[in-house]
Amino acid sequence: MQKPHLSKGFTLIEVLMSLVIFSLIIAVCYTALGPAGVGFQQLQQVRDNMEEHGWTERQLQQDFNGFTDTSFPNTPSIRIRPDARGNAFFDELFLLSREAGHSGITLIHYSIDEAEGTLVRESRMAWARTQTKNQRMTLGACDSFRVEIMDQHGQWKNQWQTTTPHNPSMWPKAVRITMRSKDTEQQWWFPIYQGIQP
């Protein structure tokens, strides 16, 4: 007498239970790893902002290290064009600097490109004609750019022009720049080693 043939396999209930358990595992993993992925993206964004600000700080430091006086008429050594809009600042900074690798004096202009939301550095030789095209460098995302200058009395001012028609050229003691992009704010102080020069 032969034994009946038994078929091996999963029953429908076993397959359904496996699918339910697999779905629960996926849901738990997604719930646990979802915020970690968002946190990683935020961390990456903060790191990118810090790298951009680091590059901006190095460029500003180079420009202030070469800060110089001028013999050009009507060209101040440093000038601020203030522009405050509530908690945001769109100041413009103009300064003369001796750049490494360049002969002569460079006129440098920092400002925010409002259409792009970036800080821009434009430069050209100070003796060049006004029609000369500026060299343009984008320094990263920027929502606010504030420039203040310390005067000979240690007071911070948001307006400064080193050359006036009736007064000798006066240099600031230091420059303070506050830059903000999204949730990151950075502040730098740059001493002017020449101090106040009559």
Image (spheres, rainbow, N blue to C red):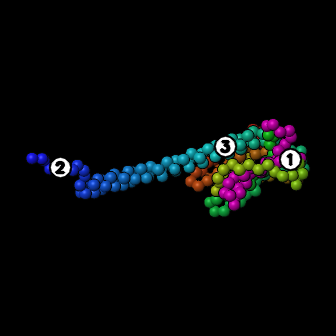
Which of 3/132 is in front?
3
Place of residue 6 in the rendered image (x, y in percent of width and height, measured from the top left): 18, 49
Please report whichever mark, 1 or 3, sits nearer to the chain's N-terminal start. 3
Q: Residue at x 83, y 39 (%)?
A: 102
Q: Is residue 118 magenta?
A: yes
Marks 2/3: CA–CA distance = 77 Å
Q: Point out the frontmost of discs 2 and 1.
A: 2
**Looking at the image, can residue 69 be seen?**
no
Place of residue 125 in the rendered image (x, y in percent of width and height, measured from the top left): 85, 46
User: Dot 3, crowdedness within 10 Å: few (<14), some or many (≥20)?
Assistant: some
The kind of residue tagged 3 is Trp
Residue identified by numbered label 2: 5
Q: Residue at x 89, y 48 (%)?
A: 128
Which of 34/121 is in front?
34
Q: Point out the frontmost of discs 1 and 3.
A: 3
Q: Residue furthest left?
A: 1
Please report whichever mark, 2 or 3, sits nearer to the chain's N-terminal start. 2
Residue identified by numbered label 1: 126
Place of residue 35 in the rendered image (x, y in percent of width and height, measured from the top left): 44, 52
In the image, taking residue 98 as reference, residue 34 lies left or right, namely left
Q: Residue furthest top?
A: 101
Element under disc 2: loop
Q: Is residue 121 magenta?
A: yes
User: Dot 2, crowdedness within 10 Å: few (<14), some or many (≥20)?
Assistant: few
Residue identified by numbered label 3: 55
The kind of residue tagged 2 is His
Q: Residue at x 36, y 53 (%)?
A: 26
Q: Quadrant of the C terminus?
A: top right
The kind of residue tagged 1 is Ala
Please state the extent of the stretch shown in magenta in the rendering. 100-127
